[in-house]
Image (cartoon, helix red, strand yellow):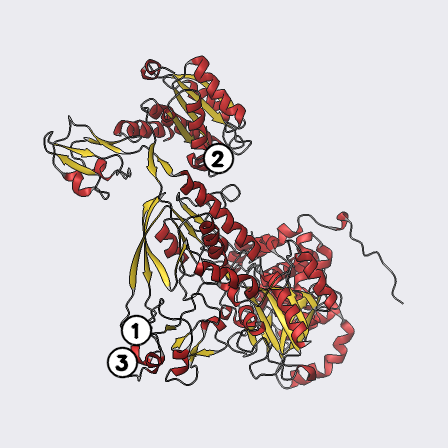
């Protein structure tokens, strides 16, 4: 299309999409079409079932060519969904893509408006706004900005480990940040993994040590992201490395300091063992910790609390790795993409008091039992009660903190399978009679139903019913000294009392308590429950609403290990697609100064958060560098003379849009 | 030997509006959200004595098995302790559903034979409605007459002793009904009737 054609009298084409019945069921399409025909400069109005489909796009392309249209309006879904689609279609037909304007009559109208007449009027108003606006649109070009090649991975669980390794193998420089002193996450605590029962350590620890030794990976453990600035392809990230009081590069993990500590026995809660054992103030998180470096807990270390310790640990260290003067340190990183893989937390079982967790010593959470059955756990893999005896009867209660309006509404997805796994391991190690109390058995996964079948044949008992309570109030002689689980066996239709020695609460998966702070930090969204939101539940499952930031693993929703690893791989592919392209196209929504109007008052210069404006002394006016401008609009609002304007959002465009919308009122 | 009867249920045996009706009385729209986990039955202190567990009553109500639900002993055994309602993971107002079923059973005169709780409830409310107070002797007399007159003979000795001790009087207790002015009994009935409508 020639330049003269584009600058000539506007010729607008309006296309109203049915979106199947998504829009058509609530909006009177014919009425919108008839209304659009009455709007100024409108040459043609059409409607189509799916404007985003090939025939839909061809419709407007043909009209551009045959009717000489130079402005296009599509009334359909959110620009987030298909603005790019229609811009490309417009461009392909020879028109500058910024001569296209979208009116959102799906998310903003048909999906949220109950009354059909109102929905139709609202759609008409939005179409009117778009037509009035598009007439004033100008031809613009995307800015190309180079992308930084490095990638940040946040979270060192199996998702983060897999993502970091895959990126590093593709030749990218990766920084892996982990909040805990070691990478490994929840998976490092497990003994076996379902349904194959392969040993978690055997498949995880080699990956952990590969992370440590990979030349392309920088591992920052005991560290947290505290600040994120910039935009897609160009992020500046600040990471706080918490003081370990041990120099990582000097420590070889010999544990001499731990031996030498003035505390002869462990006295403090060992969080890695879920509180089932005690540790000293100086400790190694667990034998296979990566990095293999000890740390000192300032809350319990006598020297750090009072400064009055014999410091035997420091004396014992032959490499002088211990340094009590160490402080937190801030590291700045420049990255092009960020993968967030911060995982989950387990449900706090004390929130359901009728199960007696914290009241009866032999009521355990599933994560505690994972440590009990683990060969490197506090009991060396022996399933023992608190008094050291072996349980003869064990009850496993499913859905603790899942599928419950009062705690978490969602199904945690992994509990059925891990409960089956624990049932198998407990039955195998202790020969105990095991009862699984479930609401519904959910085993949709490769080999999962087969595993359930195996458990049924092994003679594990299954009772379909949600346990109502765990009590030490006994009725019959065989219940003496035991805990009794009361539940309806719903398949028989009777209430049963099951006496057991040990109760395992299969706690659900929840978003981290600080998920909201984390999502604010990265400027992404999360659901009401705190799960990070993907850009599209089906078609963009690892992207977020912030370009350049991707999510993987259970931080997006409860997930088992295979799905977590698959999603980590997907996030890596998306990140590579971004950094390997080498550049990003930025929306040309930058601000500009109309020289004739500028009085050179400097107001905008002080306001600009990106230092994109400078004062041109000779001309006596302000100038904006479009490469630095992020299009925030601050200068536009601040300018007292109306000289600062923004592409795509000029005052006139906004006023016309408002006038169009006012049709609705 | 017991007779063998048909146990299969045909759609014609169900009342498609039953669930809606009960949910309406009990403000129990969440009834439909029941996942049949049985937590209510497990939490219920009297479920071991019921003919159907509370979970099954919810299922029968939802599926429209009106006759079965209304003639069960479950709804009359319910002690209204609200344990089920507190523990229900779907926050279904199970106790309120039980009350709705009781109301419905009384209206439809569908309750288990020799299970006089419904008669007792009706006679009690009729007496209070008419006289403003309950008189124990008359309540017992009506209850036995309408359920099992012969049982009254067995209880007559106890009744006589209570009478002689002055624990039970022949006199009908009553309070004035009033004319519907503020504060008198008739105002309460008027308010209740309005609420019923």
Q: Chain of mark 1?
A: A
User: Marks 2 and 1, Cα distance to the nearest angstrom?
Assistant: 64 Å
Q: Chain of mark 3?
A: A
The one nearer the camera, B27 or A201, is A201
User: Marks 3 and 1, Cα distance to the nearest angstrom?
Assistant: 13 Å
Other-residue count near label 1 (Cα within 10 Å), few / some / many at <14 / 14–19 / ≥20? some
Q: Are marks 3 and 1 in contact (CB under 8 Å)?
A: no
Question: In this figure, which residue is indicated by the disc labeled 1?
Answer: A323
Q: Are marks 2 and 1 in contact (CB under 8 Å)?
A: no
Residue A40 place in picture, x, y as percent: 36, 18
Residue A323 place in picture, x, y as percent: 30, 73
Helix, strand or loop under label 2: helix
Question: In this figure, which residue is indicated by the disc labeled 3?
Answer: A307
Q: Chain of mark 2?
A: A
Question: In this figure, which residue is indicated by the disc labeled 2?
Answer: A110
- Which of pointers 2 and 1 lies earlier in the amino acid sequence? 2
The one nearer the camera, B157 or B53, is B53
Residue A171 place in picture, x, y as percent: 44, 48
């Amino acid at each position: 299309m020639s330049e003269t054609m584009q600058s000539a009298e506007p010729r607008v084409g309006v296309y109203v999409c049915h979106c199947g019945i998504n829009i058509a069921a609530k909006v009177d399409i014919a009425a919108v079409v008839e209304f659009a025909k009455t709007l100024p400069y409108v040459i043609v109005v059409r409607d189509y079932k799916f404007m985003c489909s090939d025939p839909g796009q061809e419709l407007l392309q043909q009209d551009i060519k045959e009717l000489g249209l130079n402005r296009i309006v599509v009334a359909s879904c959110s620009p987030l969904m298909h603005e790019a689609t229609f811009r490309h279609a417009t461009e392909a037909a020879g028109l500058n893509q910024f001569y296209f304007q979208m009116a959102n009559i799906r998310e903003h109208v048909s999906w949220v408006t109950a009354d059909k007449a109102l929905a139709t009027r609202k759609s008409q108003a939005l179409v009117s706004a778009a037509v009035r606006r598009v007439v004033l649109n100008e031809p613009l070009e995307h800015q190309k900005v180079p992308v930084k090649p490095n990638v940040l991975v946040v979270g060192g669980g199996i998702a983060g480990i897999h993502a970091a390794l895959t990126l590093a193998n593709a030749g990218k420089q990766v920084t892996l940040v982990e909040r805990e002193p070691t990478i490994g996450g929840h998976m490092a605590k497990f003994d076996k993994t379902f349904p194959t029962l392969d040993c978690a350590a055997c498949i995880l620890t080699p990956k952990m040590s590969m992370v440590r030794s990979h030349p392309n990976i920088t591992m920052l453990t005991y560290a947290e992201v505290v600040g994120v600035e910039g935009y897609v392809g160009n992020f500046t990230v600040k990471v706080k490395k918490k003081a370990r009081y041990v120099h990582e590069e000097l420590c070889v993990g010999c544990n001499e300091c731990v031996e030498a500590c003035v505390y002869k026995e462990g006295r403090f809660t060992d969080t890695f063992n879920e509180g089932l054992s005690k540790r000293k103030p100086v400790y190694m998180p667990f034998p296979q910790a990566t990095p293999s470096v000890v740390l000192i807990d300032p809350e319990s270390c006598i020297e750090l609390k009072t400064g009055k310790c014999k410091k035997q640990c420091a004396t014992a260290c032959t490499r002088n790795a211990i340094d009590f003067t160490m402080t937190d340190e801030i590291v700045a990183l420049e990255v092009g993409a960020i993968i967030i893989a911060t995982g989950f937390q387990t449900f706090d079982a004390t929130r359901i008091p009728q199960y007696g967790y914290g009241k009866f010593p032999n009521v355990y959470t599933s994560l505690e039992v994972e440590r009990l059955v683990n060969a490197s756990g506090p009991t060396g893999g022996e399933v023992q009660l608190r008094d050291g005896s072996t349980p003869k009867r064990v009850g496993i209660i499913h859905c603790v903190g899942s599928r419950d309006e009062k705690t978490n509404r969602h199904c945690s997805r992994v509990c059925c399978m891990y409960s089956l796994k624990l049932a198998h391991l407990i039955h195998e190690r202790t020969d105990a009679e095991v009862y699984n109390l479930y609401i519904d058995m959910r085993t949709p996964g490769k080999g999962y139903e087969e595993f359930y079948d195996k458990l049924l044949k092994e003679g594990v008992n299954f009772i379909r019913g949600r346990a109502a309570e765990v009590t030490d109030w006994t009725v019959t002689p065989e219940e003496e000294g035991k805990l009794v689980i009361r539940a309806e066996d719903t398949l028989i239709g009777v209430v049963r009392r099951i006496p057991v020695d040990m109760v395992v609460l299969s706690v659900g998966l929840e978003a981290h308590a600080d998920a909201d702070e984390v999502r604010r930090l990265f400027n992404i969204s999360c659901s009401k429950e705190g799960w990070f939101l993907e850009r599209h539940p089906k078609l963009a499952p690892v992207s977020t609403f912030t370009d350049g930031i991707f999510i993987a693993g259970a931080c997006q929703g409860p997930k088992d290990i295979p799905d977590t690893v698959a999603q980590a791989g997907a996030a890596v592919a998306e990140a590579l697609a971004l950094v390997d392209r080498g550049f990003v196209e930025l929306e040309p929504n930058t601000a500009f100064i109309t020289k004739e109007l500028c009085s050179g008052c400097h107001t905008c210069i002080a306001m600009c958060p990106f230092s994109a404006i400078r004062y041109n002394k000779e001309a006596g006016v302000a100038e904006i560098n479009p490469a630095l401008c992020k299009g925030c609009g601050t200068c536009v609002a601040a300018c007292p003379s109306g000289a600062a304007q923004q592409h795509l959002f000029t005052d006139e465009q906004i006023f016309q849009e408002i006038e169009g919308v006012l049709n609705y009122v | 030997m017991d007779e063998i009867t048909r146990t299969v249920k045909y759609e014609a045996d169900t009342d498609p509006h039953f669930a809606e009706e009960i949910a309406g009385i009990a403000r129990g729209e969440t009834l439909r959200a029941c996942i049949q986990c049985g937590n209510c039955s497990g939490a219920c202190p009297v479920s071991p004595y019921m003919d159907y567990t509370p979970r099954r009553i919810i299922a029968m109500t939802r599926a429209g098995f009106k006759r079965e639900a209304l003639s069960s002993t479950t709804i009359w055994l319910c002690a209204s302790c609200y344990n089920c309602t507190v523990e229900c993971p779907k926050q279904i107002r199970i106790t309120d559903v039980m009350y709705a079923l009781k109301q419905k059973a009384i209206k439809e005169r569908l309750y288990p034979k020799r299970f006089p709780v419904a008669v007792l409830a009706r006679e009690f409310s009729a007496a209070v409605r008419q006289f403003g107070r309950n008189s124990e002797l008359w309540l017992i007399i009506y209850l036995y007459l309408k359920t099992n007159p012969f049982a009254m003979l067995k209880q007559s000795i106890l009744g006589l002793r209570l009478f002689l001790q002055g624990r039970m009087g022949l006199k009908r207790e009553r309070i004035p009904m009033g004319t519907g002015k503020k504060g008198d009994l008739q105002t309460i009935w008027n308010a209740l009737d309005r609420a019923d409508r």
